[in-house]
Every structure is written in structure tokens, then in C-alpha cells.
Image (spheres, rainbow, N blue to C red):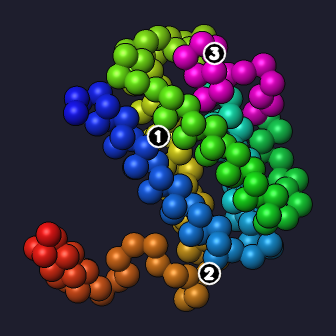
Amino acid sequence: MNFENEYLKVVQERCKSIKSLGDKTVSQLSEDNIHWTLNDGSNSVAVIVKHLSGNMVSRWSDFLISDGEKPFRNREQEFEDNISSKQELINIWEKGWAVFFEALSDLGEQDLLKKVYIRGESHTALDAIERQVAHYAYHIGQIVYIGKQLKGEYWESLSIPKGKSEEYLQQMLRRHQSK
């Protein structure tokens, strides 16, 4: 296995993990929760999902052959909270991720140093991938934070719960020692 293929594999696995955090958060939210905002300057989970999906569809459709800011994208509309249901939100979410993962799976080692464009600015495909992974992780962190605040004591932890670090460490050590 070479470095480039290993990199593409790692990116896909890392992004599946990032997506999973969003999936697990959205599953804990109610229909009302997905539309909650702290103030006029903040975005709801529904808006963040629309923005992520719009970005993914734009950036990753024809990734190597057209600018990542597609003419069909209306970024401003992504910030309008007009999702009618949690199921619609999930459909929009899944559409974006499907386009992203399909484009990633189509890439090979020979593609990583190719030039791609985002709003006319040149990037290597590798740089564009890294740029988007950081962007997606940033917004999913927002979704998780909103979910955690809304659910309060009813929040189901997505990582190691407070006070359980040592227990988790020992569990992981036992698991890996048996291999």
C-alpha cells in the first residue's frame, strides 16, 4: 500500500467518524430542536445541515473537472431555516454526504496533486480535501455543541463521558492486548 492510497482511506474513515457525530446528535434532537437558535446571529442545526449539504454537493460534484462553486448553488438560501421536518433534514444531510463520499471513493493517488478550483482559486486536490474536512468538522462541532446544550442532562455522550476516562482507557488496553 502506498502513502497516497492510505491517505485517501484515512480521510474517508475520518469523515465517516465526523459524520457519525452529526448522525448521533441529530438522532437525539426533536423536530423543534433542529430549528432552535440562540439569537439572530446564530444558525440552527437545520441551517447548518443545509449549508453543509449545499457545500458538499457544490464542491464534490465533478470535483476534478469544474470549479467547486457551482452555478446551481445558492449559498444565501442555505442560511434560510425552511426545512419542514427532521426527516427532510436527514434527507438533505444524507444527499450531501453521499456526493462527498462518492467523489472521494473515485479519487486515486494520481489525482491528489491535480489542480482544482474553488471560486476561481487554484488548489491541489489534496489541499481542497483538507480544506473541506476542516470545514465539515467545524460545523459538525457546532451541531454537537447545540445538541448538547439543548439536551442538557438528557444528552447521550458521543465520546468518553466525564469521570469515565480511566475505565475507557483500561477497556481499550484490554481490547488491543487481546489482538
x 56%, y 69%: residue: 24
Mark 1 residue element = helix
Residue 3 within the segment the image draws in magenta: no
**Residue 98 vertical placement versus 142 (above, below):** above
Q: Quadrant location of the C terminus?
A: bottom left
Return the mark for residue 33. none
Circle 1 or circle 2, nearest the eye = 1
Crowding at label 1, few (<14), some or many (≥20) Cα neighbours within 10 Å? some
Q: Badge 3 is on which residue?
A: 67
Mark 2 residue element = helix
| Location of residue 87 in the rendering, given as x and y in whole percent from the top left corner | 79, 64
Residue 67 within the segment the image draws in magenta: yes
Return the mark for residue 151. 2
- Quadrant of res 42: bottom right
Mark yes or no: residue 153 visible.
Answer: yes
Which amino acid type corresponds to the residue marked 1 in the rendered image?
Val
Which amino acid type corresponds to the residue marked 3 in the rendered image?
Asp
Crowding at label 2, few (<14), some or many (≥20) Cα neighbours within 10 Å? some
User: Which secondary structure type mostly characterizes the magenta part of the structure?
Assistant: loop
**Image-based side of 65 in relation to 5, left or right:** right
Q: Earlier in the sequence, mark 1 or mark 3?
A: 3
Q: Earlier in the sequence, mark 1 or mark 2?
A: 1
**Image-based side of 130 in relation to 86, left or right:** left
CA gap, disc 1 and disc 3: 18 Å
Magenta span of residues: 60-75
Q: Badge 1 is on which residue?
A: 133
